[in-house]
Image (cartoon, helix red, strand yellow):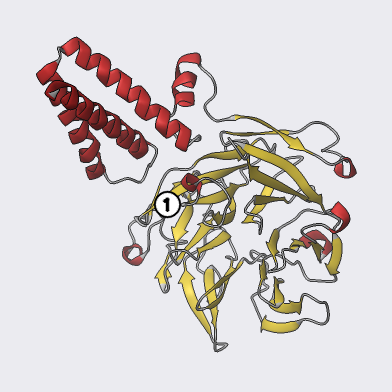
């Protein structure tokens, strides 16, 4: 009886130890000290086994419990980095980056390049569909509280909207605003749509009508023309890009994040940001994030970045590279805030979103999704990557969705929809893609 009970306890120790180890392996941001727990649990299980059975049977039990732990993790986290599928791929040579996911395209949207079957690659179990097509490339979009999608089309100087759920089952785009000056970033407030143009930001009621000027006099001297908008509890945050690749700005608003607070006062929230590609706010923990396109020259350029934003910080551009050490020693680098994740130069990060509001398994809801537009030389291909965030530590980018060629289609912005799905814009052919977790997988 004592032997049977001891072996049962050993089985529990080994199984839980292996499961804990696989969970930690699936978490790239886990502290190294956490590994002591599964190591000690497995060690106690082995010690208990060796008291009652020989080494060969202990090794067999160790392998059996490892398979049980792996199976449990694979069942709970289908996209885990350590999974039965990953082991199978290791021995079969299958590409671990993912499988082809066929894009579902309504016949109304089947103009080129969607007149031929299109597949994207993802390791995640996704249902992909073409939600709608607009008459030009989309720079940014957002969802109103009622679920209507608003999208900016800079080349047309317009903002379109698409009702959701669609009227009569049709995702038909409707012109909402026109004759704008290069509209870029959007933010959907409770009652108004905020639209960033080159030199101003205006508010437009969803019911239509004349816009109200919110901010004017933004620099228009030939530098970066687009802005990103993000509502945070303190007010409205918006980006202003640099005038050049690497220079000392004479205009103090350039290469900054500005905050329009609740009293209508303007403050510099962050500086040293050459070009913010995307802003994301996680309401669950209050964290604020920005993706940044860094300088290109002199070769090989500085790393593109993901930054955790905090009020009053300097993020280094143009004197300091991504880790705030700088290629050349400079006293200004000592006060610069380093990036939380460094990307390849010319990865060209664009849209950014928190996954907290997704109707996806829990493993995906503590992450950021980032659009990489890549470069024409194919050193970095267009993709959406996922970065897991645990205790403010950010894991390495892993594949979420890829397969755009950068010529006929390229992602530009990304947001969670009111239905918990991921929506991705295309700035070449005006597509809005929808990526929903496959139920039951």
Residue 275 in sight in this render: no
| Mark 1 burial class by Cα count in 10 Å: few <14, some 14-19, many 20+ | many
Residue 14 in percent (x, y) is at 25, 28
Q: Nearer the viewer, residue 249 or 440?
A: 440
Residue 148 in percent (x, y) is at 75, 64
- Residue at point 66%, 81% (across, down): 217
Residue 220 in sight in this render: yes
Which residue is at the far front?
Answer: 1
What kind of element bears circle 1?
Answer: strand
Question: Could you tell me which quadrant the C terminus lies in?
Answer: top right
Give left or right: position of 438 versus 24: right
Question: In the rendered view, would you say 299 is above or below 88?
Answer: below
Q: Quadrant of residue 201?
A: bottom right
- Residue at point 62%, 40% (across, down): 439
Give left or right: position of 221 versus 355: right
Question: In the rendered view, would you say 146 is above or below 404?
Answer: below
Question: Could you tell me which quadrant the N terminus lies in?
Answer: top left
Residue 367 in percent (x, y) is at 48, 51
Which residue is at the far bottom?
Answer: 263
Judging by the rendered image, the residue that carries numbered circle 1 is 389
Residue 400 in percent (x, y) is at 56, 40
Question: In the rendered view, would you say 49 is above or below 130?
Answer: above
């Amino acid at each position: 009886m004592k032997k049977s009970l001891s072996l049962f306890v050993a089985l529990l120790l080994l199984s839980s130890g292996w499961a804990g180890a696989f969970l930690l392996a699936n978490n790239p941001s886990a502290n190294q000290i956490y590994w002591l727990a599964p190591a000690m649990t497995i060690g106690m299980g082995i010690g208990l086994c060796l008291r009652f059975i020989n080494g060969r049977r202990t090794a067999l039990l160790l392998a059996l419990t490892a398979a049980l732990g792996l199976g449990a993790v694979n069942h709970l986290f289908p996209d885990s980095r350590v999974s039965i599928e990953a082991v199978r791929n290791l021995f079969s040579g299958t590409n671990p980056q993912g499988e082809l996911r066929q894009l579902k395209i309504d016949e109304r949207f089947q103009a080129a390049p969607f007149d031929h079957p299109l597949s994207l690659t993802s390791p995640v179990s996704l249902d992909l569909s073409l939600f709608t097509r607009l008459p030009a490339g989309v720079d940014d979009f957002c969802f109103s509280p009622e679920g209507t999608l608003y999208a900016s089309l800079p080349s047309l100087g317009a903002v379109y909207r698409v009702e959701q759920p669609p009227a009569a089952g049709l995702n038909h785009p409707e012109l909402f605003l026109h004759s704008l000056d290069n509209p870029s970033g959007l933010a959907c407030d409770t009652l108004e749509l905020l639209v960033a143009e080159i030199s101003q930001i205006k508010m437009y009621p969803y019911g239509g009508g004349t816009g109200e000027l919110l901010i004017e006099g933004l620099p228009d001297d030939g530098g970066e023309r687009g802005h990103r908008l993000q509502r945070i509890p303190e007010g409205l945050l918006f980006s202003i890009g640099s005038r050049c690749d690497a220079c000392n700005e004479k205009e103090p608003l350039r290469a900054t994040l500005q905050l329009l607070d609740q009293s209508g006062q303007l403050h510099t929230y962050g500086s040293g940001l050459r070009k913010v590609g995307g802003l994301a706010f996680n309401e669950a923990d209050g964290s604020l994030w920005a993706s940044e396109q860094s300088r290109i020259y002199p070769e090989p350029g500085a790393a593109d970045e993901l930054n955790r934003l905090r009020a009053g910080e300097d993020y280094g551009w143009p004197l300091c590279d991504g880790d705030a050490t700088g290629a050349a020693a400079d006293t200004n680098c000592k006060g610069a805030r380093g990036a939380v994740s460094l990307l390849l130069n010319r990865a060209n990060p664009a849209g950014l979103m928190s996954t907290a509001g997704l109707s996806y398994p829990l493993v995906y809801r503590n992450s950021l999704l980032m659009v990489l537009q890549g470069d024409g030389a194919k050193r970095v291909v267009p993709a959406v990557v996922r970065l897991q965030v645990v205790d403010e530590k950010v894991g390495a980018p892993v594949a979420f969705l890829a397969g755009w060629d950068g010529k006929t289609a390229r992602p530009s912005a990304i947001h969670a929809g009111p239905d918990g799905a991921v929506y991705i814009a295309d700035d070449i052919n005006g597509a809005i893609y929808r990526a929903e977790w496959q139920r039951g997988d």
